[in-house]
Each structure stands twice: as C-alpha cells, then as structure tokens.
Image (cartoon, helix red, strand yellow):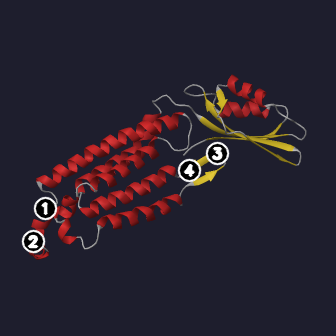
Amino acid sequence: MSPTALHDSALSFPGLIDAYWSPAELLTNAVILLHLLGALLLGLMVGYERSYHGRAAGMRTYGLVCMASCALTIIAGFPNSWYGGHGAAVALVDPTRVIQGVVTGIGFLGAGVIMRSGFNISGLTTAASIWASSVIGIMVGVGFYMAAMGLAFFSAMIMIYLNSAVRLLPSRQAVAVTLRFKPGVRPEEQELRRQALERGYEIAGGSLTIGSDKGCQEWRFVALALAHAGAPLSSLASELSGFEGVDGFSLSHARN
C-alpha cells in the first residue's frame, strides 16, 4: 500500500482500526500466543529446577524472561503484519532499531530494582516484570493487540498465582544463616554440617564464608532443606539461643 493510499484509508478511522482485527491479523496473533505459551511453560520448567535448589531466580523470573524474549523474537518474523498490515508504508525508520533501544533502556531500569543483602536477593521478579511490560508496550505499538493482551494476562497470572502453585510442588527451603561466635571459639566445619543434617538441612556448596573481627569468628552460609520443609526458623532460633559458644545469630529465608 502506498503512502497516498494509506492516507486515504486513514480518512476512514473505523476502516483503519478494523485492519488491526482482520482475520489475517487475528491468525498471526493466535500463532504468537501459542509461541508465548510454549516459551512460558519451558521457562517455568527451567525456573523450577533453580527454585528447587534454592537459587535466587525462580519460576516467576525465568517464566517472564523466557516469554518476553519469545515475544520479541516472534514479532520480528511477521513484519508484514505490523501496524495492521501497513508496516511497509508507515515505518519511516527500521522499527527493530527502536525496539532494540527500548529493550536496552528498560534493562538498565530493571537492574536498578534488584537489591542484595547478604545471601538474600530481592527484586529479580520485579525487574523481569518491568522488562515484560516493555515488551507488552512494544507489541501494542506495532499492532499485535491480542498477543499483547495475552502476554499481559500470562504475566499477571504468574505474579499473582504462581507462588501459591509452587507451594504444591516439591521444593527445598533455603535459609540464610549468620553465626557469630564468642571470642576464642573455633568451630569445626564438619561438626557444623553434622548439626545441620540432624535438623534436616545441608549447607549449600560454595556458600560458606568465614570472617573474623576482634577475635570473634562469623560464619555465613545458606542451608537447604533436605525434604519439603526442614525445621522451622523458630525452632532453629530456639536451639541456637542455647548453643554454647554462639554469641549471636541471624536467620532469614533466602528469597528472590
């Protein structure tokens, strides 16, 4: 369609809007939605493996990122369907360059909401949802309305209901532990691991860090529950309070 013809069709506003909901456009949107659903399921599968092993990024983060990445890739394969089928006529610049700039800029914005405190990392899902929201805006911008609504729906369902569903799946609780010992106390790593196993936990490999200040050692590590749930934090806190040689401690759920 030439720019002149497009201008003439634009005079009929209902006709221009109808182009975005034509049978061909709806079929393209349906194909995109199927790709999004497949990417979401695969992303959730990978995320569950990470979540089961107590890693920071879990199912919500992986699902959002995988689905949004699929959305950007799949819309690039249907340039003739952009802007209601008028992409060649209205695109004065390459839209993919605009998309690249938007995605890069939003990536920096998402990184700003990720916070780390000790072994706890928060904001990963928020960052992923911000990035997914930018992809929703891009899809609306190029005219894939139905697919954009599907992506928004899937994203909202992930953030609202996925945590409840995850509780029904086998998982391993991750606990961030900080132990501060009294001056002169020199704990043994093997004894610490044995004590953790007796309470249904194991120390995650590579997570143990040891520091010393004014003769007092401080041990930090992540403990992973061996079963669906280890001893609750309240029970662990009660036991640690009575341990000889422990001057102070901190327990918290390692979360994302």
Amino acid tagged 4: Ser
* Alpha-carbon span between mark 2 and mark 4: 50 Å
Residue under label 2: 9
- Image position of 179 (left or right of 216): left
Asked whether 120 or 9 is in front, the reply is 9
| Quarter of the figure with the N terminus | bottom left
First-in-chain label (1 vs 2): 2
Location of residue 241 in the rendering, given as x and y in whole percent from the top left corner = 78, 34
Q: Quadrant of residue 165?
A: top left
* Alpha-carbon span between mark 1 and mark 2: 10 Å
Q: Is there a contact, CB below 8 Å, between mark 3 and mark 1?
A: no
Q: Secondary structure at mark 4?
A: strand
Q: Which mark is residue 119?
A: 3
- Image position of 94 (left or right of 14): right
Residue drawn at (72%, 28%), measured in percent from left and top?
193
Residue under label 1: 19
Amino acid tagged 1: Ala
* Alpha-carbon span between mark 3 and mark 2: 59 Å
Residue under label 4: 122
Location of residue 215 in the rendering, given as x and y in whole percent from the top left corner = 89, 45
- Image position of 155 (left or right of 53): left
First-in-chain label (3 vs 1): 1
- Image position of 72 (left or right of 250): left
Q: Is there a contact, CB below 8 Å, between mark 3 and mark 4?
A: no
Asked whether 15 or 235 is in front, the reply is 15
Crowd tier of the residue under label 4, counting other residues whose Cα lies within 10 Å: few below 14, some 14–19, many 20 or above: some
Residue drawn at (63%, 37%), measured in percent from left and top?
175
Crowd tier of the residue under label 2, counting other residues whose Cα lies within 10 Å: few below 14, some 14–19, many 20 or above: few
Location of residue 221 in the rendering, given as x and y in whole percent from the top left corner = 69, 39
